[in-house]
Amino acid sequence: MAAMATMAQTGLFISFEGIDGAGKSTHIDALADALRATGRTVVLTREPGGTPLAEQIRALALHQPMDALTEALLMFAARRDHIRQVIAPALTRGDAVLCDRFTDATFAYQGGGRGLDWQSLSKLELLVQDTRELEADLTHKPLLQPDLTIWFDLPPAVAAERLVGARVPDKFEAQPAAFFDAVRAGYARRAGEAPRASPASTPISRATPCGATCRRRCRAGDGCERAGPWIARQLESLLAQRGHAWLLQGPSGLGQFELAEALVRAWLCDAPTPQGACGKCASCHGIDVHTHPDLVVLMPETDMIARGWPLPEKAQSDIDDKKRKPSKEIRVDAMRDAIEFAQRTSGRGRGKAVLVYPAERMNQVTANALLKTLEEPPGDVRFVLATDAAHLLLPTIRSRCLGHTLLWPDADEALPWLSAQGIAAGEGAALLRAGGGRPAEALALAQGKDSARRWALLPRALAQGEASALADLPLPEAVARLQKLCHDLLALQVGAAPRFFDRADLPERPLPVGALTKWWQQLAQSTRTAEHPLNPGLATEFLVSSARQALNSRR
């Protein structure tokens, strides 16, 4: 699509517009994944909503009868809180903000659909989106507007067909076809005004929704099974059982976090099914945008930042002020906040949930702080702990949880799923082998620009001492790849089949077991220091040198 966009100095703000059923959610998720693959931190949000206060206003606006001006005032009130609490801080941090609807929707729905005076809406826009009173560095944006707005222009009849039976319609979705024709005309008018050189102008790109002839609507938590059918199958089994605390365990890369998140989604969902959350209600959206009032996620601060979950205000302030670095452990302060949260009343009446991942990152003090609440939880709070190293947890923690060991997916399930993620069949099979049969790891390799050919050439490159074979890899990942290679070479020497590499990609001549064993011990030592602040270049050179020596040894 042709689009004009201006990049904000402190972040990127993109809004997605269109009537329900146009496909905004599908495209937002796809763009978020693409931006994260480039290293950007992405904030997903929506309007009206995005903050606890704005979500309450949303419920009023969507379900209570009122006139057009009252609706517009509520929309702009929610927008002001949303800008102050979510959008402006994210842009100041340099994040990418993807918003499902923004001010253009108010002009289209309340202006076009309800017939409210356009000039009145423009005055409210100037008042609410003025950034000069915000505690954020947005001086280059005196009036906050998206850098790009994408309007999905879908005929209302097609959108209505997609929504048949999808959910109970709110008061807007229940309007007659003439209302949506007027909304579409409002969007068109707003798009026609956008190119003007005025402070309130936003470049708008008109897009034909992907799958305009498609007869289903993809959304988070639906049958698309974005985490894989093996996760969906295990989720259904867990939801059929009772228990206030689950421990999800198994080797890394089997989807511990995805299963844990799906579990809490279903617990908190307004309209859950035996298969999981509906993916459409306010609760599901609250989890999507990481603002659910009844969910606490406990992760190391490094993981919270990487996954786009907000840190507590004090922790974020300390890190922003360079007082300390993000923690790689789950801090006891965060655990104490979670325990205090467990004592409060549920905000939405569906109970509360605490997700801990990876649970082995709790130190002894943090784990002991959790222990009493885990043993005698308040009536409406449930816990899910996910880990790939359950043996590192305190026995008292393990004994107070129902255990579930994650299942290995079959290749017959994993390869079609990888293909659905855009990976060619031949490439997917090779990357699945490289990931040790873990589809998530295979997908991560593909997203990290690792081709099957590059993986196949790794043994030869290391034998020749080429440091570029491990270039741009974090040290823990570099060590892990070398351990996979060493594992397969040792397996060959004792007559076993390799697991991670094709036999044809490994050295033809036998290698001495003693040399390989010594190399394995060196790699085991390297794992203990891989996350320490060493000189990455020197550490990589040492790893490549050790690999070259082992691959060329003769005794």
Image (cartoon, rainbow, N blue to C red):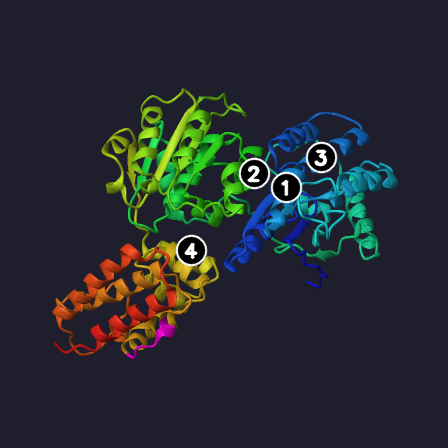
| Position of 312 relative to 199 (above/below) | above
Spatial CA span between label 2 and label 3? 18 Å
Task: Find numbered disc 4 in the image and state the secondary structure of the residue it sits on.
Answer: helix
Q: How far apart are marks 4 and 2 (CA)?
A: 24 Å
Q: First in sequence: mark 2 or mark 1? A: 1
Question: Which of 539/391 is in front?
Answer: 539
Element class at badge 2: helix
Q: Which residue appears at 61% of the width and 43% of the height? A: 45
Say which residue label 2 marks.
Answer: 285
Q: Name the residue under label 3.
A: 172
Give yes or no for contact between labels 2 and 1 (Cβ–Cβ under 8 Å).
Answer: yes
| Residue 70: percent from left, percent from top | 78, 29
Disc 4 versus disc 2: nearer the observer: 2
- Marks 1 and 4 sit apart, C-alpha to C-alpha, by 29 Å
Mark found first going from the N terminus, 2 or 3: 3
Give coordinates of residue 193: x percent, y percent: 83, 53
Point 19% across, 61% down: residue: 521
> Residue 417 — which label?
4
Q: Which amino acid does label 4 sit on?
A: Trp
- Distance between mark 3 and mark 1 Cα atoms: 16 Å
Indicate the amino acid at tag 2: His
Which numbered mark, 1 or 4, is in the foreground of this view? 1
* Residue hosting label 1: 46
The residues tagged by marks 2 and 1 sit, at their Cα atoms, a distance apart of 8 Å
Q: Are marks 4 and 2 in contact (CB under 8 Å)?
A: no
Q: Give the extent of the magenta segment.
A: 464-469
**CA distance separating discs 4 and 3:** 36 Å
Q: Earlier in the sequence, mark 3 or mark 1?
A: 1
Looking at the image, tell me whether mark 4 or mark 3 is earlier in sequence order: 3
- Image check: 295 left or right of 23? left
